Image (cartoon, helix red, strand yellow):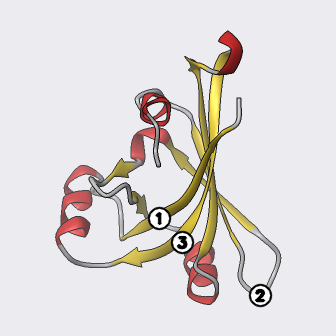
Amino acid sequence: MLTEKFYEVLKNEGVVSIVSWGKDEPHIVNTWNSYLVVTPDERILIPAYAMRRTEKNVKENNRVKLTLGSREVMGFNDYQGTGFVLEGTAKYLESGAEFDMMKEKFSFLTRVLEITPLSAKQML
């Protein structure tokens, strides 16, 4: 599901926005492209330090939306820059092999946000 262009975007820095919603209004939190780690089965692991509201929302409703992009990657019709919108499900990891691997890469994390994409659409 994740295309070669998606992986190319990840190689360049840019802002990632994660939208979650529980009983209240949607909540947005940001991170960086360079913090995303994609597993062989295409789950996305994100180091979480704060993200407490996102965690609360995910416990109530595990659906999330995620956007990311880069000005450095050529998009559709030879336009400079491209981005993606992903929809998926999320959960938090607090232990295990993937948590340990992420903790080695990002010592600041307290948990890992795991997103399982259900769709990924290139937007630009």
Q: Place residue 118 in its image quadrant.
A: bottom right
Alpha carbon distance from label 2 to label 1: 20 Å
**Sequence-first disc among 2 and 3:** 2
Q: Would residue 85 be found to the left or right of residue 51 on screen?
A: right
Q: Residue furthest right?
A: 25
Please tell me which residue is depicted at 35% across the width and 50% down the height of the picture.
38
Q: Secondary structure at mark 2?
A: loop
* Nearer to us: label 2 or label 1: 1
Please tell me which residue is depicted at 44% across the width and 64% down the height of the picture.
48
Alpha carbon distance from label 2 to label 3: 16 Å
**Sequence-first disc among 3 and 1:** 3
Mark 1: give few (<14), some (14-19) or many (20+) Cα within 10 Å. many
Identify the amino acid type marked 1.
Ile
> Residue 94 at what x, y percent from top left?
31, 78
Identify the amino acid type marked 2.
Lys
Q: Which sits in the foreground, 91 or 43? A: 43
Alpha carbon distance from label 3 to label 1: 6 Å
Mark 3: give few (<14), some (14-19) or many (20+) Cα within 10 Å. some
Q: Would residue 110 be found to the left or right of residue 8 on screen?
A: left
Q: Which residue is mark 1?
A: 115
Q: Which residue is mark 3?
A: 89
> Which quadrant would the C terminus be assigned to in this image?
top right
Q: Secondary structure at mark 1?
A: strand
Please tell me which residue is depicted at 43% across the width and 32% down the height of the picture.
4
Mark 2: give few (<14), some (14-19) or many (20+) Cα within 10 Å. few
**Sequence-first disc among 2 and 1:** 2
Q: Which residue is mark 2?
A: 23
> Residue 15 at what x, y percent from top left?
59, 40
**Tags 2 and 3 in contact by the CB under 8 Å rule?**
no
**Tags 3 and 1 in contact by the CB under 8 Å rule?**
yes
